[in-house]
C-alpha cells in the first residue's frame, strides 16, 4: 500500500539506481574511447537511456509524493464512502488528465511513466543492435524484422496514457530483445575455451535474465496488482543486479579477472 515512507524509499532507490547505471555507461564510453568499437557505443546508449528512464520515474514519484497528502486528507474526510484503493485510482486518473491537459504531453507522460517507458524501449533497441553487431554476421534482415515489431509498439507507448498497457508493451519489447541475447551469449559460453570470456558471456546472459525479470515484475505491478506492491522494489533490484552483471560481463575488470584466476 502507498505510504509516505514507502514512496520516499522508492525515490531514493531510483536515484541510487540512476547513478549506478550511469557509472556502467561511463565505463562503456571509456572502453569505446580506447578501442573504438561500435558495439560499445550501442551498450553505452542502452544504459544511458535506462538510467534516464529510472531518473524520470523518480521525478514522477516526487510529484506523487507532493500529491499524496491531499489524497490522504480526502480519505480522512470521506474514506467511509469509498475504499482508499478505489478513491486513489479515481484521483490518480483525474490528476493524470488534468496534468496532460493543462501542462502538456511531456509533463503528463513523465507523470504517468510513459516517457520513462519509451526511453527504456529505445534502450532495448540499441541493445538489440549491439546483439547483432557483437554476435552475428547477417544483421540487416533481423534488424528490419525487429523494427517492424518495435515501431508500432513504441508509437503506441508514446500516445497511450494507460499505465497497464504501457507496461505490457515494454515487457513485449524487452522479451524480444533479451531472449536472443541470452541464447547467443550462452552459445558463445559453450563455444569459448578461455575462462575469463566464458564467465563474461555467462554474465552477459545473466544481465538479460535480470532485465527480463525487471520488465516482468513491472508488468505484474501494472496489470495484476492493486498498485504500490512489493513488485516495484523487486523490479528495481533486478535492474540493480543487471547493472552489476553488465559491468562485469562487458568490461571484464581486472579485479574480476584476478578473482577467477586469470592474469591481467
Image (cartoon, grey):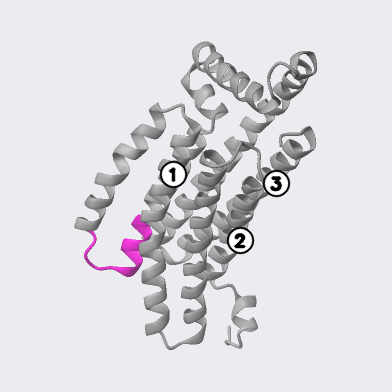
- Which is nearer the eye, 132 or 216? 216
Q: Tell me, for residue 170, which label it has, or none.
A: 1
Position of residue 87 measured from the top left corner of the image (x, y, whole percent): 65, 21
Q: Residue at x 43, y 88 (%)?
A: 193
Displayed quadrant of residue 134 = bottom left
Position of residue 94 measured from the top left corner of the image (x, y, whole percent): 57, 16
Task: Please determine whether, in this image, residue 17 is positioned above or below residue 87.
Answer: below
Label 1 crowding class (10 Å Cα cut-off): few <14, some 14-19, many 20+? many
Question: CA–CA distance between discs 1 and 2?
Answer: 19 Å
- Look at the image and tell me in which quarter the N terminus lies: top right
Label 2 crowding class (10 Å Cα cut-off): few <14, some 14-19, many 20+? some
Q: Tell me, for residue 13, which label it has, or none.
A: 3
- Which range of residues does the magenta coloring cover? 128-139
Q: What is the secondary structure assignment of the residue under circle 1?
A: helix
Q: Residue at x 31, y 62 (%)?
A: 132
Q: Main secondary structure of the magenta part?
A: helix
- Which is nearer the eye, 219 or 34? 219
Is residue 23 in view from this perspective? no
In front: mark 1 or mark 2? Answer: 1
- Report the residue marked by disc 2: 241
In front: mark 1 or mark 3? Answer: 1
Is residue 240 in view from this perspective? yes
Question: CA–CA distance between discs 2 and 3?
Answer: 13 Å
Question: CA–CA distance between discs 1 and 3?
Answer: 21 Å
- In the rendered structure, which disc, 1 or 3, sits on the residue that comes first in sequence? 3
Label 3 crowding class (10 Å Cα cut-off): few <14, some 14-19, many 20+? some
Q: Residue at x 52, y 16 (%)?
A: 97
Image side of residue 122 versus residue 231, left or right: left
Amino acid at each position: 500500500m502507498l505510504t509516505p515512507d514507502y514512496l520516499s524509499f522508492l525515490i531514493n532507490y531510483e536515484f541510487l539506481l540512476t547513478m549506478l547505471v550511469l557509472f556502467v555507461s561511463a565505463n562503456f564510453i571509456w572502453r569505446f574511447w580506447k578501442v573504438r568499437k561500435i558495439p560499445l557505443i550501442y551498450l553505452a546508449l542502452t544504459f544511458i537511456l535506462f538510467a534516464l528512464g529510472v531518473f524520470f520515474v523518480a521525478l514522477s514519484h516526487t510529484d506523487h509524493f507532493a500529491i499524496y497528502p491531499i489524497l490522504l486528507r480526502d480519505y480522512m474526510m470521506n474514506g467511509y464512502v469509498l475504499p482508499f484503493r478505489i478513491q486513489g485510482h479515481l484521483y490518480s486518473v483525474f490528476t493524470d488528465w488534468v496534468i496532460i491537459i493543462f501542462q502538456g504531453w511531456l509533463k503528463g507522460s513523465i507523470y504517468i511513466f510513459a516517457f520513462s517507458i519509451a526511453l527504456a524501449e529505445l534502450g532495448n533497441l540499441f541493445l538489440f543492435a549491439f546483439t547483432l553487431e557483437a554476435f552475428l554476421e547477417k544483421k540487416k534482415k533481423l534488424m528490419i524484422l525487429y523494427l517492424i515489431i518495435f515501431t508500432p509498439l513504441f508509437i503506441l507507448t508514446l500516445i497511450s496514457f494507460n499505465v497497464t498497457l504501457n507496461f505490457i508493451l515494454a515487457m513485449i519489447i524487452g522479451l524480444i530483445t533479451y531472449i536472443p541475447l541470452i541464447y547467443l551469449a550462452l552459445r558463445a559460453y559453450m563455444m569459448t575455451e578461455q575462462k575469463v570470456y566464458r564467465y563474461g558471456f555467462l554474465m552477459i546472459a545473466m544481465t538479460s535474465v535480470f532485465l527480463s525479470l525487471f520488465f516482468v515484475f513491472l508488468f505484474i505491478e501494472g496489470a495484476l496488482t492493486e498498485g504500490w506492491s512489493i513488485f516495484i522494489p523487486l523490479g528495481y533490484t533486478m535492474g540493480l543486479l543487471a547493472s552489476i552483471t553488465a559491468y562485469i560481463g562487458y568490461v571484464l575488470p581486472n579485479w574480476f579477472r584476478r578473482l577467477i584466476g586469470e592474469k591481467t
